[in-house]
Image (cartoon, rainbow, N blue to C red):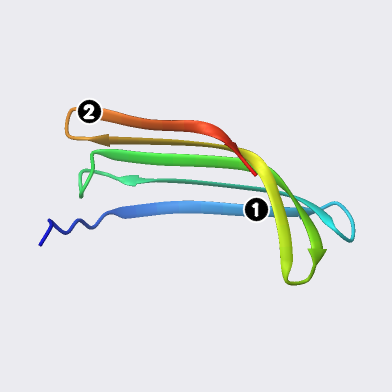
Amino acid sequence: MGKKVAALFACARIQYPLGDRWSLAGYADIGGFGLGSDLSWQAMAGANYAFNPDLIGKVGYRIVYNKYRKDWLHFLGSFF
């Protein structure tokens, strides 16, 4: 069985409607603080389109950083 890790995180999320179907969205979080990982953070900004109340399309950009011990892992890129 693998090692279990727990970490403390703080986060924020916002969604701003632009009309009936479109909205802007964003979120960010930061955590780790030496518990599990040294430091971890991510941020996302994008737009949402509601095809109907149950189906929403999203497009945007996301960045993720994670410092675990001495190494930094990072991921950058678009999402659809």
Classify mark 1: residues with Cα within 10 Å, few (<14), some (14-19) or many (20+).
few
Residue 45 is situated, as x and y percent measured from the top left of the image, at 64, 41
Q: Tag 2, which secondary structure?
A: strand
Residue at 47% over, 52% down: 11
Q: Which of marks 1 and 2 is in front?
A: 2
Residue 4, by quadrant, is bottom left
Which residue is disc 1 drawn over? 14
Q: Looking at the rendered structure, which numbered label has been put on residue 58? A: none
Left or right, 18 with reference to 35: right
Residue 34 is situated, as x and y percent measured from the top left of the image, at 20, 43
Q: Tag 1, which secondary structure?
A: strand
Residue at 54% over, 52% down: 12
Residue 80, by quadrant, is top right
Classify mark 2: residues with Cα within 10 Å, few (<14), some (14-19) or many (20+).
few
Residue 19 is situated, as x and y percent measured from the top left of the image, at 89, 56
Q: Say if mark 1 contacts mark 2, CB within 8 Å.
A: no
Type of amino acid under label 1? Ile
Type of amino acid under label 2? Asp
Q: Looking at the rendered structure, which numbered label has been put on residue 71? A: 2
From what the image shows, is residue 34 above or below residue 15? above
